[in-house]
Amino acid sequence: MAVFSQVETAAAPPALGPYSQAVKSGSLLFLSGQVGVNPGTGKLVSGGVVAEARQAFENIGAVLRAANIDFSHVVKVAVFLVSMQEFSSLNQVYQEFFSPPFPARSAVAVRELPAGAVVEIEVTAVL
């Protein structure tokens, strides 16, 4: 028997592999990483890290809403960037979705990401 339940929404892109968009376990919601795929087209948005990060956060917002919460419930964010030179651009978009007190966060550079994305974002939220 699973110790978690799945959260899914058509308002965010479907999983690109054998995983859930998010799972609830106890009082926590764990979201899988989101890239800047437009759920309507199924394609990565154009415009680089700013456009991709904004779309990834929109996708995250859709999954949070499917669990009846919002960005104010997010306690941890993990960001994966293909280039750390995009860090300040990411921060500009980040502040469109979060305000003080900001969630805990990590950001790391990676070699490549799914779908050719330049940024992937995952969050953990309290229900």
Image: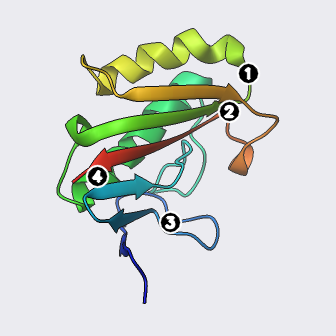
- State the CA–CA distance, disc 4 to disc 3: 14 Å
Q: Which residue is mark 2?
A: 118
Q: Earlier in the sequence, mark 2 or mark 1?
A: 1
Separation of marks 2 and 3 at Cα, in angstroms: 19 Å
Tell me if 72 is positioned left or right of 24 in this view.
left
- C-alpha separation, residue under disc 1 versus residue under disc 4: 27 Å
**Are circles 4 and 3 on residues that touch, CB within 8 Å?**
no
**Under tag 2, what secondary structure?**
loop
Question: Residue 11 at what x, y percent from top left?
Answer: 34, 59
Q: Please, what secondary structure does the residue beneath circle 4 have?
A: helix
Density class for disc 2 (Cα within 10 Å; few <14, some 14-19, many ≥20) is: many
Residue 14 circle label? 3
Sequence-wise first label, 1 or 4: 4
First-in-chain label (2 vs 4): 4
Q: Which residue is mark 4?
A: 64
Q: Secondary structure at mark 1?
A: loop
Separation of marks 2 and 4 at Cα, in angstroms: 23 Å
Say which amino acid is labelled 1.
Ser
Q: Nearer the viewer, mark 4 or mark 3?
A: 4
Viewer-nearest residue: 77 or 3:
3
Q: Which numbered tag is attached to residue 83?
A: 1
Q: Earlier in the sequence, mark 4 or mark 3?
A: 3
Q: Quadrant of residue 3?
A: bottom left
Q: Is residue 48 above or below residue 56?
A: above
Q: Are marks 1 and 4 in contact (CB under 8 Å)?
A: no
Q: Residue at x 37, y 41 (%)?
A: 58
> What number of labels is visible?
4
Q: What secondary structure is found at the residue carrying circle 3?
A: loop
Q: Amino acid at mark 4?
A: Leu
